[in-house]
Amino acid sequence: MAIERKEPDNRMSQIVIHNDMIYLAGQIGEGPDVKSQTVSMLAEVDRLLAEAGSSKSNILQAQIWLSDISTVAEMNEVWDAWIDPKNPPARACVESKLVTPDFLVEVMVTATKG
């Protein structure tokens, strides 16, 4: 039952794999608004899941933080177009103060290799 860590630095690993479970660190995106940050953030989730040997169809749980809950509709528009509608994960979405005011959305994903 080895633990595999990918893209580690002195603070955290971007991916931790244990057995068939994949845990991603919190992911943020780039851009001037929540919509563009969500697109960028989910592209990074796709990349990390592919590196771990998985895909968005195998996401079990997603935890989403918005710096302003009034932007949930814009985030959901991107999320709904991105997520596999046949395999939607369990999900929570809350408002929270993020690390910097530039960060408008962050997601943390748990998935399986499937």
Image (cartoon, rainbow, N blue to C red):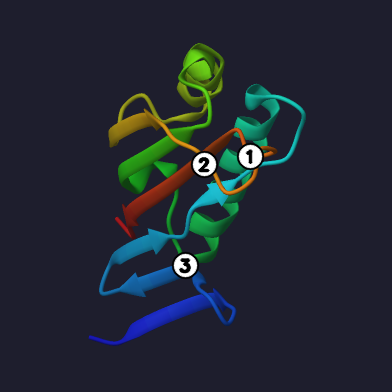
Q: Nearer the viewer, mark 1 or mark 3?
A: 1
Q: Nearer the viewer, mark 1 or mark 2?
A: 1
Residue 21: quarter of image = bottom left
Element type at mark 1: loop
* Circles 3, 2 touching at the beta carbon (< 8 Å): no
Q: Nearer the viewer, mark 3 or mark 2?
A: 2
Mark 2: few/some/many CA within 10 Å (<14, 14-19, 20+): many
Going by the numbered disc 3, the residue's amino acid type is Ile
Going by the numbered disc 1, the residue's amino acid type is Phe
**Residue designated by label 3:** 15
**Residue designated by label 2:** 106
* Circles 1, 3 touching at the beta carbon (< 8 Å): no
Q: Residue at x 48, y 18 (%)?
A: 72
**Residue designated by label 1:** 103
Going by the numbered disc 2, the residue's amino acid type is Glu
* Circles 1, 2 touching at the beta carbon (< 8 Å): yes
Name the disc covering residue 71, or none. Answer: none
